[in-house]
Image: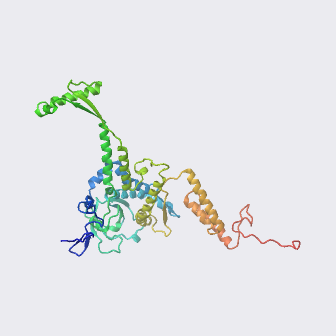
Amino acid sequence: MATELKQTGKPRFKLTNDGSVIPTHDGLSNVVSGMGTNRDRRTYNRFTITSMNDYLEMEAAYNENWIAAAVVDNPVEDATREWRHFTGKIASAIQEAEKKYEIQERTQEAFTWAGVYGGAGLLMVTDQDFDQPLKVEAITKGSLKRFVCLDRTMISPSAYNYSDPTAENYMRADRYRINGGTQDVHHSHFILAPGSPLPPRLRLLNNGWDDSILRRCMEDLKDSVAAKSGVASLIQEANIDVISRENLATDLSSGDMDQDIINRFMNFGLLKSMFRLALLDKNEEFDRKQVSFGGLGEILSVLMEWTAGAAKQPMTRLFGVQSKGLGDSGEGDARSYFNRIRGDQEKKYRKFLNRIDEVMIRSTLGEMPADTNYEFNPLDIPSEMEVKDRNLAEAQTDDLRLQQKVVPRSAVAKKLRDSGQYVIDDKFIKQIEDDERAEAAGEFRFNIGETETTHPGAVNPPPTHSVADD
């Protein structure tokens, strides 16, 4: 029970049984216009949470509507299309392992279904028991068998972690059970692909899963699709024929002339369509009404903008249309979108892939090298001129660092080898490292055509002095 407190000139409040005080409206009111009072319709506006787990509607939208599919697919495709590259001696071995286990395909699959349902992930099938925590340090060569993608409709939490905030799975499932089976799966065997974030309380009500990316755009999607369908229906009725017939209401009310009237005007429509001939009775009048479509294009454009905003994608990416506006090429929108995708790669995809690499690399090499590292490739494919400009800038930077003597020549050679631009073997790099060690010890090695003054590691000898110079 709540007691309402009224004060003249002040906002009204309600005092609840637990002692909390809540306002009944905002502080600005006008009794003459009704603003801020019970007469103001705006005071009854209220956000409500719609159904969060209507899987059938989300599946139908994703499968039947190309815009709904693009809302989910585009960010995942852009984040994983160019993929990543490892550096170091183990790069080629890891890339072969990625192809063997189809890491790129499984990652795309997991994040796609997480966007549709709000939850999905990869089950790591190893030689360890599912009902026990996965011991990463115990992974040996050949322990990993495969990855299996499971969405939230295929696997259900059977136990939750509500009491240990220090664990990485706090407020999420502690154990899962595959639907239709009896096997318990510890959460460490399941790599979770996130959807849209939810407040902790709603995540708790949602069985530890995230929200669907598609569900958050559903209202705007429905408005856009309904408007497009309505315009398409109007086009079919661009011209409406109107025939005035004497005593039509009386004939229809009699009940025995309905079919005759229907046949009469169906034949009229057939004759007009086939022979462009209109036959009318002397007492009948014919008129044609034309429907105006002015302003419909602007309405559709606004709805498309709302849908693109809900999907967090630029119009050029979601609908494939050019940006409108004088001097607007869409590059700014594309840059902002790619910056968001790059942020998702570092925040979501890297965390997801690091869990995969802990098991995959150990299973491939038998150990986890300390220098294992990777970077995501550029999101867009650069042009030939952009590649040349970038290579020139990097070459100039490397040359400047060499002149400043802040990096050795062997570091530049290793960088070029790892980039794959040149075929540089370990023997050549070892030779450069031997030369650098000799130079550091004062033993200079010269190749054919080099002199002591032109060698980058040499020190110019002091000038000679003679009596004639005096």
Q: Position of residue 411 (x, y in %)?
A: 59, 66
Q: Is residue 184 visible?
A: no
Between 213 and 169, the residue placed more toward the observer is 213
Between 296 and 114, the residue placed more toward the observer is 296
| Quadrant holding the N terminus | bottom left
Tell me if residue 207 comes above or below residue 309 in the rendering. Answer: below
Residue at left offset 21%, top offset 30%: 244
Residue at left offset 14%, top offset 32%: 258
Q: Quadrant of residue 22?
A: bottom left
Q: Position of residue 87 (x, y in %)?
A: 52, 63
Tell me if residue 222 comes above or below residue 147 in the rendering. Answer: above
Q: Position of residue 305 (x, y in %)?
A: 38, 51
Q: Quadrant of residue 243?
A: top left
Residue at left offset 75%, top offset 64%: 451
Q: Position of residue 14 (x, y in %)?
A: 23, 71
Please, which residue is most extreme toward the right here? Answer: 468
